[in-house]
Image (cartoon, rainbow, N blue to C red):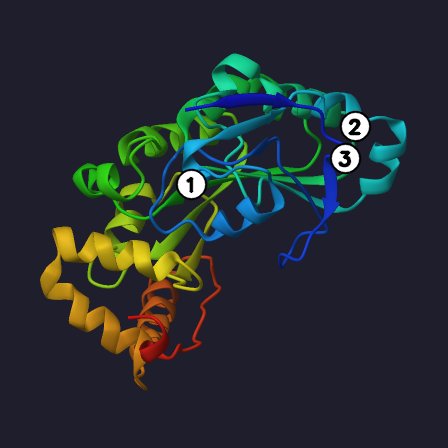
């Protein structure tokens, strides 16, 4: 995989995400190779011809862009790391761009959110502890490592992520589990809760989004590994039905019964199957 070191013009950008004012993305591209990646659209903003998970640009000067002016800009704001990459992909072990960014944010008054699928985040506990207001998201789609190897092959194992949650919690760092994407008939979100309860402050749920070319990747995956599920996915996404309404109600009832703090960010839009198949 080609890895390029690039000089970024800016590193703190305005966010369109809920609950976030600004985002910081230390890398362009991502090497987790998730089949459901929603950020593949970012390729259009780069000069690459390769698939999004087959290249990586390292914003090598990113920490230098967080100066006093930048810190004033984000003071008392919500800053999310990262929105279209993972700040702890494998290359972070070498380049340490995320670590250096966090070092620059230690004196910031911003509320920092860090999202990852990697236990490499444990390397930076010493810095994270110094941040004045921080939350760490550990994303989980499945607790089956066999399924993980297919849908997100270069992310940390579910057990490694659970162990990361435990270590973060030991240090009194606020954490939450982001159960995303919920893959129909494959993501056992109740099992994820069962394995992580006690080690996280709350849960966030989001369902699978099949916009753009994501559906093509999901369809190929299903045809190869779960052909019996393909008609069910097509029914869920391309016909009128209440599947996600029922899942949402199930989450609400389950979390309500067990007094589990949670947030639900579901997409309910339907696409025209004739334009996609």
Which of discs 2 and 3 lies nearer the camera? The answer is: 3
Task: State the image quarter where residue 98 is shown.
Answer: top right
Looking at the image, which is closer to me, 93 or 10? 10
For the point 68% across and 37% down, the residue is 133
Residue 34's place in the image compared with 11, above or below, is: below
| Secondary structure category for the residue under label 2 | loop
The residue beneath circle 2 is 66
Please tell me the numbered disc located at residue 10.
3
Which badge, 2 or 3, is on the more N-terminal residue? Answer: 3
Residue 214's place in the image compared with 107, above or below, is: below
For the point 80% across and 44% down, the residue is 76
Q: Position of residue 97 (x, y in %)?
A: 61, 21
Looking at the image, which is closer to me, 167 or 96? 96
The residue beneath circle 1 is 51
Classify residue 65 as left or right of residue 17: right
Looking at the image, which is closer to me, 247 or 66? 66
The answer to whether the residues at label 2 and label 1 have Cβ atoms under 8 Å apart is no
């Amino acid at each position: 995989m080609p890895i390029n070191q690039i000089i970024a013009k800016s590193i703190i950008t305005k966010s369109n995400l809920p609950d976030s004012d600004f985002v910081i993305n230390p890398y362009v591209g991502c090497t987790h190779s998730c089949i459901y990646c929603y950020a593949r659209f970012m390729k259009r903003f780069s000069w690459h011809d390769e698939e999004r998970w087959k290249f990586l640009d390292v914003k090598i000067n990113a920490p230098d862009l967080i100066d006093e002016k930048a810190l004033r800009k984000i003071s008392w704001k919500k800053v999310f790391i990262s929105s279209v990459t993972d700040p702890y992909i494998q290359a972070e072990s070498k380049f340490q761009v995320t670590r250096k960014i966090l070092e620059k944010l230690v004196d910031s008054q911003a509320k920092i959110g860090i999202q990852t699928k990697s236990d490499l985040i444990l390397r930076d506990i010493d810095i994270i502890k110094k941040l004045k207001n921080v939350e760490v998201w550990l994303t989980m789609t499945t607790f089956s490592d066999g399924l993980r190897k297919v849908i997100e092959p270069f992310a940390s194992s579910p057990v490694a992520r659970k162990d990361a949650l435990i270590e973060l919690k030991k240090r009194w760092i606020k954490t939450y589990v982001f159960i995303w994407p919920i893959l129909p008939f494959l993501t056992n979100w109740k099992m994820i809760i069962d394995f992580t309860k006690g080690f996280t402050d709350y849960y966030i749920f989001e369902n699978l989004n099949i916009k753009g070319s994501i559906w093509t990747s999901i369809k190929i995956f299903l045809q190869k590994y779960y052909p019996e599920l393909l008609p069910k996915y097509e029914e869920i996404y391309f016909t009128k039905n209440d599947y996600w309404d029922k899942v949402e109600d199930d989450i609400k009832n389950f979390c309500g019964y067990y007094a589990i703090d949670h947030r639900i960010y579901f997409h309910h839009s339907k696409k025209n199957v004739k334009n996609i198949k």
